[in-house]
Image: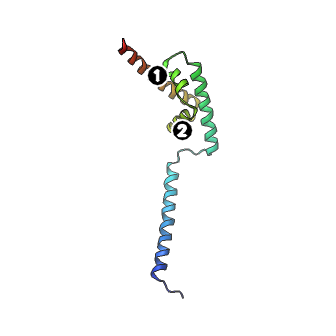
């Protein structure tokens, strides 16, 4: 029978602690993963939503300052991250979200214009 030495006990204790920390971290990360989708499918979906937002923004370019700002200032990457951050997965919600942003930017530009004159 092997005798337990302090070094051996310490080594087993550290291994158990590391295993517990790994399992806790894995559990914690799985709780925060909101998307049940495959990451590749989610990326494809978001890229399709980015295309839809850009097409709509180009079509609405002359309607308001906000839409022209989205066309001229927002990169595909920024639109992608905004959609991802907000958890948007439908075209309707994406367009609604960016319409809200365009409206705010238009109102802000109008407010600035009104103070100039």
Residue at x 51% of width, y 66% of height: 19
Neighbour class for label 2 at 10 Å: few (<14), some, many (≥20)? some
The residue tagged with tag 1: helix, strand or loop? helix
Percent across and percent down for residue 32 are 49, 48
| Viewport quadrant of the C terminus | top left
Q: Is residue 103 left or right of residue 51?
A: left
Mark 1 or mark 2, which is nearer the start of the sequence?
A: 2
62, 41: nearer the viewer: 62
Q: CA distance from mark 2 to mark 1?
A: 21 Å
Query: Disc 2, disc 1: CB below 8 Å?
Result: no
Point out the residue furthest to the front here.
116
Q: Residue 74, which numbered label? A: none
Q: Is residue 110 left or right of residue 64?
A: left
Neighbour class for label 1 at 10 Å: few (<14), some, many (≥20)? some
Query: Up-down: is 13 above or below 2?
Result: above
Percent across and percent down for residue 76 are 58, 32
Residue at x 63% of width, y 33% of height: 48
Total label count?
2
Determine the image quadrant of residue 106.
top left
112, 103: nearer the viewer: 112
| Viewport quadrant of the N terminus | bottom right
Percent across and percent down for residue 82 are 51, 35
Query: Up-down: is 115 above or below 74?
Result: above
50, 87: nearer the viewer: 50
What residue is shown with label 1?
A: 103
Residue at x 49% of width, y 66% of height: 18
Residue at x 49% of width, y 75% of height: 11
Q: Residue 84, which numbered label? A: 2
Point out the residue furthest to the bottom here.
1
């Amino acid at each position: 029978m092997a005798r337990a030495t302090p070094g051996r006990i310490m080594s087993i204790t550290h291994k158990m602690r590391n295993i517990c920390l790994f399992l806790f971290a894995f559990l914690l990360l799985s709780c925060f993963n909101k998307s049940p989708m495959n990451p590749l499918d989610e990326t494809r979906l978001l890229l399709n939503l980015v295309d839809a937002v850009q097409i709509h923004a180009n079509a609405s370019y002359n309607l308001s300052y906000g839409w022209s700002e989205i066309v001229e200032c927002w990169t595909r990457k920024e639109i992608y991250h905004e959609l991802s951050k907000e958890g948007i997965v439908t075209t309707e919600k994406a367009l609604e979200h960016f319409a809200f942003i365009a409206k705010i930017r238009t109102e802000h530009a109008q407010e600035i214009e009104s103070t100039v004159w």
